[in-house]
Image (cartoon, grey):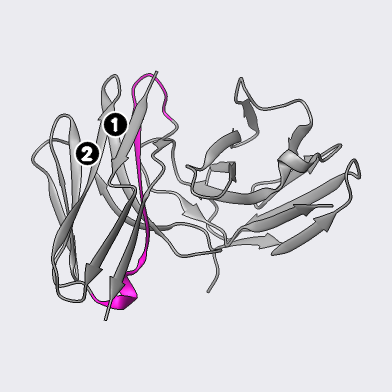
Amino acid sequence: DAMVIQNPRYQVTQFGKPVTLSCSQTLNHNVMYWYQQKSSQAPKLLFHYYDKDFNNEADTPDNFQSRRPNTSFCFLDIRSPGLGDAAMYLCATSRETGITEAFFGQGTRLTVV
Amino acid sequence: EDQVTQSPEALRLQEGESSSLNCSYTVSGLRGLFWYRQDPGKGPEFLFTLYSAGEEKEKERLKATLTKKESFLHITAPKPEDSATYLCAASSGGSYIPTFGRGTSLIVHP
């Protein structure tokens, strides 16, 4: 049974057109993360939440925003996607930060045309 | 700044040919060292967590070990289904969130 679910699996958006990616979890974990992964690169952390506390990475562009309305759901908003934002976006959860493993969703592959 | 370096970037093996993947880390006070497997187009799948030097964990053909500076993922008698990218991540007292390496892409030929 999938424990971290991302929708959609594939998303095509137009240059500059806002897009929202969603993530839900059934694990009741405190921490939720959003990563960006480009081909043959390490996953790059964009944000994470510990419960409702939002933590933004210093180098995450302002174009990226996130919401966590409740424990189960988290959203990634890209306000004005550029061609450089085409990537796999991964959502993950963990019980705690840094000492327990992360559970990843299947990812959303974003294409910008 | 925490750093995680994986080598080699790519590895091709024949079925049954054992080998090791390396993960070198530079962090201030290791909290956890994580190994994940990632298949093409999918999210990473958790394999192991190691917390202190000398610790070892095994699962089927995989064995992870940890020293004060690096971790190894040993693959014994690999099969084609072991083909994947293997990611390493380390968390520290300075940055609780794990830093990922770029991964090793493993291909096992039948």
- Secondary structure type for disc 1: strand
Tag 1: residue type?
Arg
Chain letter for the residue marked with disc 1 in the picture: B
Circles 1, 2 touching at the beta carbon (< 8 Å): yes
Q: Where is residue A26 drawn, in percent x and y? A: 58, 61
Tag 2: residue type?
Tyr
> Height in image: B106 above or below B51?
below
Q: Determine if marks 1 and 2 fall on one subunit.
A: yes
In the rendered image, the residue lying farthest to the left is: B54
- Which region of the structure is painted magenta? B79-96
Q: Where is residue A27 drawn, in percent x and y? A: 52, 57
CA–CA distance in space, label 1 to label 2: 6 Å
**Dot label at residue B105:** none
Left or right relative to A10: residue B49 = left
Q: Is residue A68 visible?
A: no
- Name the residue tied to disc 1: B31
**Dot label at residue B51:** 2
